[in-house]
Image (spheres, rainbow, N blue to C red):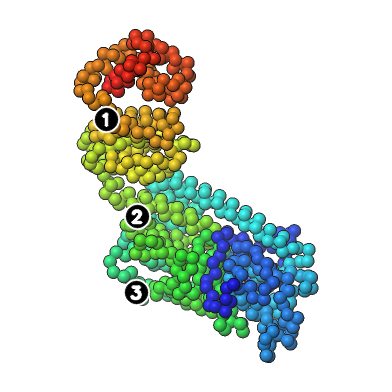
Amino acid sequence: MPDPSAPAAPAVVPPTPPVPLAALLAREDLALRQIAGPSGPGVVIHGAHASEMSDPYPYLLGGELLLTAGVHIPEAAGSDAGAPGRAKPERGDYFDDYVARIVAAGGAALGFGVAPVHDTVPRALVAACETYRLPLVEVPPQTTFSGVARAVWQLTAQARLAELRRVTEAQQSLASAASRPDPVQAVLRQLARRLGGRASLYGPDGTEIASAGRAPGDDVRTALDRLTRVVRPVTDGPRPAPDQADRDPAPRSRTPEPSDPDPAPTDPTPAGPAAAGRAPATHTDPSDAPAQAADPGRTCSGSHTFAPAALSGPAVGRTGPVANPVRVTPAAGRSGPASAADALGGTHLAAYALGNGEGFVLGVAVPRREAGDHTIASVATVLLSLLTGERQSGTGAARSSALVRLLLGASPDDVAPLLGDGRWLIVHARPQSRAPDPVAGSALGAALGSALVDVDREVVRVLVPAGREPAPQPGWTLGVSAPVAPHAWPSADAQAARALARARVTRAALVRHGGRPGLDGLVPADEAEGFARELLAPLAGRPALADTLHTWLSLHGSWDRTAVTLGVHRNTVRQRIGRCAALLGTDLDDPDARMELWFALRHQ
C-alpha cells in the first residue's frame, strides 16, 4: 500500500479521453445534481471510482469522479467532536482534510450518495468543496454507483470514438495536402483548419517562413516565437537563454475560463487549514498530452515542466500566484526537447521540433485544446519533416536535377551519376489488400532505402541501389530485378514485372529475377542470340504467343497459373500453347524441347 504520508508525486491521468462533467449531469436517468464547486465545459473527468476510505489518496490515479456514501465519516465530524485523534478539533476539520487529500491526489470531482447512511449531503462537506473548488455532485437514492460508473464508461467510449474519428480524418487530409503542388503551405492550412487556430513553420534562423489560419495578437505571436526557441536544436554550447527584453511584460492570468477545457497547470494547493504539509494536486490535461505537474521542478510521464526566465512570470492559480510552467517533452538523441507547450491567457501554444535535424520548428496557437490535438499536430510534424528535409538535402536537389535532365533528353547513363554510383535494382511491388497510394508508396520506398518511387494505379516501382538488398515487406508482394547498369534499366524493369507476376502466382512475398549465373553463361552472347532467332522465327510477329509460351514454361506448364498471370481464360492458354507447338514443330511435353525453348526465350 502506498504511504499516504510520503511526498506526493504528480498524478498520472489514465490514458482515456476527457468527459465533461456536464455531460454526465445531463443524463436524466441518473438524476445527478451538482451542489458545489466550479462547473462548465472546463470541468472534466477521466473515470469513476467508488471508495469508502477516509483517506482515498493512495487509491486514486487522478482525474476520477470519486463516489462515496459517507460510510467513513465519523458521527462527530462537523460537530463539536471533530475528527478522531484531535485534542481540540474545529468544526469541519474532517471534511477539510478529506477534500484536501482528494484534490492532492488529482481527483476531478466528488459524488456523494444520499441514503442509506446520510439523508442529506453534510453541509461541512459542501463548504469544504467550495473552499477547495472541487465539484461536488449529489447522487440520489435511486441511482447506484455502478450505474454512474457505467454512464461514465459509455461517455468515455463515445469520446474515444469521436477522437479516433477526428484524428483519422485529420491524418487523411494532412496526407492529401502533402501531395499537393505546394505541400508545406497546404499542410499548414489543413492543420490550422483541423485545430481551429494558427499553424506556423519557423526556419532554422527562427523566422516565420510560412503560416496559415487566423492571425494571433502580437503578444501571442511573441510568446510563440519564444516557445520555439525551447525546442530548436543547439549544435554548439549550452542553449542560450533569452535576454531580459523577452520577459513577460505583464502577469498572465492562468484561471481557467468556462470555454477553456484545457486549463494551464496551476498550483492547486488549498488555502484552508489542511494546506500545511500537503502536496499540491496535479490538474490534468484533458487532451491526449501527458499529465502535467504543477511543480516546475517535477518530472511527469516522460515530460518535464520548468519555467525558463524568458517564459515565466506571475500567474494566478486557484489561490495565488505561481510560476508559469512550460511543459517540454525530451527526445532521444537530441540536444533539446522534441516539443513544448505553454498558455497565454486563453490561447494554448505548442512547439514541435521537426525531425530532419535542420532546425525547422512547427508552432501552433489555438484558442482551446481538444482530445487528439497533440496527435494531429504530430502527424503534421512528420509530414513537414519529410517535406522540409527533402527541400534542404542534396539528395533531393540531385533527384530534381536528374528529372529535369531526363525531360530535356539526357540518357539514363548521363543522369545516373546524380543519383549514385554503381548498379541498380528495379523493384515492382503490389499491395496485397488495396490499390497503392502515394503515402503507402513513399513508406515502401523508405523501407527499401530509396526515395526514387513511382506509384502507378496497381504497381509501385522503386529504383534501389544494388548495395541495399530488398527484403520482404509486410502487406506487399515484391518482384526484384537483377542488378544492372543504368543503360539496362528498361530490361530490368521487365525483369521486375515478370518476377512480381511469378510472386503473385506462387503466393510468395518476394521473388528475384535470376539469382546466380546459369548454364547459358557458358554460351557466347552472340551465338545464343543467333540460336534464339532461328528457333523462335516461327513466332516472329506474334508477341502474344511468345509471351504465353514464356509464362507457361516459367510456371512449369501450369494452365491455371498461366491464365491467372496473363489474365486470360485457361482455354485461351491451351489454344495458344497448341498453336506454338504447331508453328515450332516440336513436342512441348519433351523436357529437352522445353529446355531449348526456355534458353531461346531468355536470349531473344
Considering depth in this image, is 395 or 264 the residue closer to the camera? 395
Q: Are marks 3 and 2 in contact (CB under 8 Å)?
A: no
Nearest-to-viewer mark from 3 and 1: 1
Q: Quadrant of residue 405?
A: top left
Residue 122: mark: none
Expressed as whole percent of the image width and height from the top left, the position of residue 171 reads 48, 49
Q: Are marks 2 and 1 in contact (CB under 8 Å)?
A: no
Mark 2 closeness class: few <14, some 14–19, many ≥20 residues within 10 Å: some
Nearest-to-viewer mark from 2 and 1: 1
Badge 3 is on which residue? Answer: 243
| Residue drawn at 68 percent across, 67 percent down | 50
Residue 517: mark: 1
- Relative height, residue 329 to residue 83 (above, below): above
| Residue drawn at 29 percent across, 32 percent down | 516
Dot 2 falls on a residue whose secondary structure is: loop
Mark 3 closeness class: few <14, some 14–19, many ≥20 residues within 10 Å: few
Q: Quadrant of residue 318?
A: bottom right
Quadrant of the snapshot with the C terminus: top left
Residue type at numbered disc 2: Asn
- Residue 162 visible from this viewpoint: yes
Considering depth in this image, is 572 or 397 the residue closer to the camera? 572
Quadrant of the snapshot with the N terminus: bottom right
Residue type at numbered disc 1: Pro
Expressed as whole percent of the image width and height from the top left, the position of residue 583 reads 35, 9
Mark 3 to mark 2 CA distance (whole Å): 28 Å
Mark 3 to mark 1 CA distance (whole Å): 69 Å
Badge 2 is on which residue? Answer: 356
Considering depth in this image, is 145 or 133 the residue closer to the camera? 145
Dot 3 falls on a residue whose secondary structure is: loop
